């Protein structure tokens, strides 16, 4: 989509980031405590943290976000880049914004010398899967999780 700019998050993006982040959480019928929201924001704008984010801007307004985390791998010399969260405003879906956000993460990974970009989505998110099947491979692994007690 022409007219969409993808740029890294800046400290001045706090309110728009939160609006989009809360929209993402609502999409997945989820919430996080305010302390987690505050910590996530601090990590996103701290250059010493391995987590980063970017906004999609269209018509001068943020319309999407992506979060990604660089991490080591035992399978390659180069790090992996985990695309943790991707969200596009409902009014902008189907217009190429999600693809541009993914391509941004690919470019970041390439620039950093990462070996792979990977991500997850819920099996019921068929709209996202339609895009993801066009821009990446689905390796067939099944994810298992176990929530640990708070320290």
Image: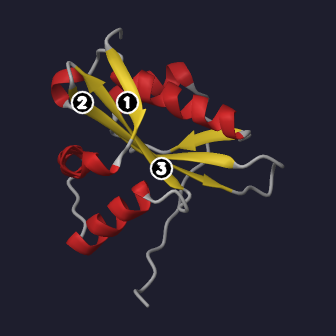
Question: Residue at 58% of width from left, 30% of height from top?
Answer: 106
Question: Residue at 53% of width from left, 61% of height from top?
Answer: 49
Of the 4 image quadrants, the one containing the N terminus is: top left
**Position above or below: 28 against 100:** below
**Residue at mark 3 to residue at mark 2: CA–CA distance:** 17 Å
**Residue at mark 1 to residue at mark 3: CA–CA distance:** 21 Å
Report the front residue among 86 and 148: 86
Secondary element at tag 3: strand
Q: How crowded is mark 1: few (under 14 residues within 10 Å), some or many (20 or more)?
A: some
Kindly identify which numbered label has been placed on residue 128.
1
Kindly identify which numbered label has been placed on residue 8.
none
Pointer 3 residue: 52
**Position above or below: 51 against 132:** below
Pointer 2 residue: 63
Name the front one of labels 2 and 1. Answer: 2
Q: Can residue 82 be seen in this view?
A: yes
Residue that lies at the very extreme toward the bottom in this rendered image: 151
Question: Which of the two labelled residues, at mark 3 and mark 2, occupies the earlier sequence position?
Answer: 3
Secondary element at tag 2: strand
């Amino acid at each position: 989509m022409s007219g969409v700019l993808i740029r890294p998050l800046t400290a001045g993006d706090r309110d728009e980031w939160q609006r989009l982040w809360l929209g993402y959480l609502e999409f997945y019928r989820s919430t996080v405590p305010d302390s987690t929201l505050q910590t996530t924001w601090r990590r996103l704008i701290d250059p010493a943290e391995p987590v980063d984010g970017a906004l999609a801007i269209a018509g001068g307004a943020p319309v999407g976000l992506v979060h990604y985390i660089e991490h080591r791998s035992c399978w390659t010399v180069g790090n992996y880049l985990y695309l943790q969260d991707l969200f596009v405003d409902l009014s902008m879906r189907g217009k190429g914004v999600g693809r541009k956000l993914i391509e941004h993460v690919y470019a970041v990974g390439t620039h950093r010398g990462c070996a792979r970009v990977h991500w997850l989505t819920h099996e019921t998110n068929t709209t996202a899967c339609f895009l993801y099947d066009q821009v990446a491979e689905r390796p067939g692994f099944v994810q298992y999780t176990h929530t640990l007690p708070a320290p």
